[in-house]
Image (cartoon, helix red, strand yellow):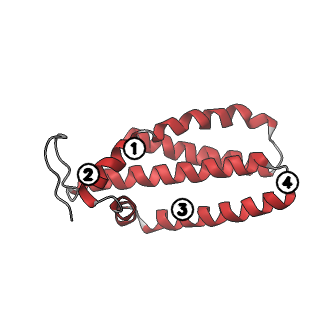
């Protein structure tokens, strides 16, 4: 899981670089890097399994609460700011019409930030011993 967290962190920083370069007008030079980001999204597929395991322990609505509880405050604030920024940029692009690459890189940035936070909180949850995760799927899970 640590490797996947580092992959999503690298994708987040790469998406920031591509997003800034897109704002500066370097669209065509970054298409190959943007394709790498599309393939990197596949590193988020294990999050479906992780969210299922966390949901078995904390309940169906507990995944977001578990992520919020085990992420550092600065990471949650950063994700909140990226969400606000994404909404503002989307409205600006709707008015301007034609800057679709900016919206796509903005979405990638938001996706990678969320995946990194989920991996970080899951790793912290597992290492803290508070997860009460079962060793196999046949064992029953306690709920809070």
Q: Which of the labelled discs sits on residue 48, or is there none?
A: 1
**Mark 3 in CB contact with mark 2 (< 8 angstroms):** no
Note whether 143 is above or below 38 in the view shown.
below
Residue where numbered disc 2 is placed? 126
Image point (38%, 60%), residue name? 67
Q: Earlier in the sequence, mark 4 or mark 1?
A: 1
Q: Which of the labelled discs sits on residue 79, or is there none?
A: 3
Give the Cα separation between the discs numbered 4 and 1.
34 Å
Which of pointers 3 and 4 indicates the residue nearer the eye? 4
Q: Secondary structure at mark 2?
A: helix
Mark 3, other Cα within 10 Å: few <14 / some 14–19 / many ≥20: some
Image point (73%, 61%), residue name? 89
Give the Cα separation between the discs numbered 3 and 2.
22 Å
Q: Secondary structure at mark 3?
A: helix
The picture places residue 24, in percent across and down from the top left corner, at 81, 50
Q: Which of the labelled discs sits on residue 97, or is there none?
A: 4
Q: Secondary structure at mark 1?
A: helix
Q: Earlier in the sequence, mark 3 or mark 2?
A: 3
Q: As drawn, is 70 to the left or to the right of 39?
A: left
Image point (67%, 52%), residue name? 106
Q: Earlier in the sequence, mark 3 or mark 1?
A: 1
Give the Cα separation between the discs numbered 3 and 1.
20 Å
Image quarter of the N terminus: top left
């Amino acid at each position: 899981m640590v490797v996947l967290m580092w992959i999503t962190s690298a994708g987040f920083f790469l998406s920031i670089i591509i997003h800034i370069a897109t704002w500066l007008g370097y669209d065509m030079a970054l298409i190959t890097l943007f394709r790498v980001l599309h393939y990197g999204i596949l590193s988020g597929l294990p999050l479906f399994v992780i969210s299922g395991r966390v949901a078995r322990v904390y309940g169906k609505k507990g995944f977001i609460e578990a992520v919020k509880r085990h992420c550092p405050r600065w990471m949650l604030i950063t994700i909140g700011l990226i969400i606000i920024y994404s909404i503002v940029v989307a409205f600006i692009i709707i008015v301007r019409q034609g800057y679709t690459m900016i919206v796509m890189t903005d979405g990638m940035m938001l996706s990678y930030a969320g995946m990194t936070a989920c991996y970080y909180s899951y790793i912290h949850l597992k290492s803290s011993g508070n997860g009460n995760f079962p060793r196999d799927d046949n064992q029953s899970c306690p709920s809070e």
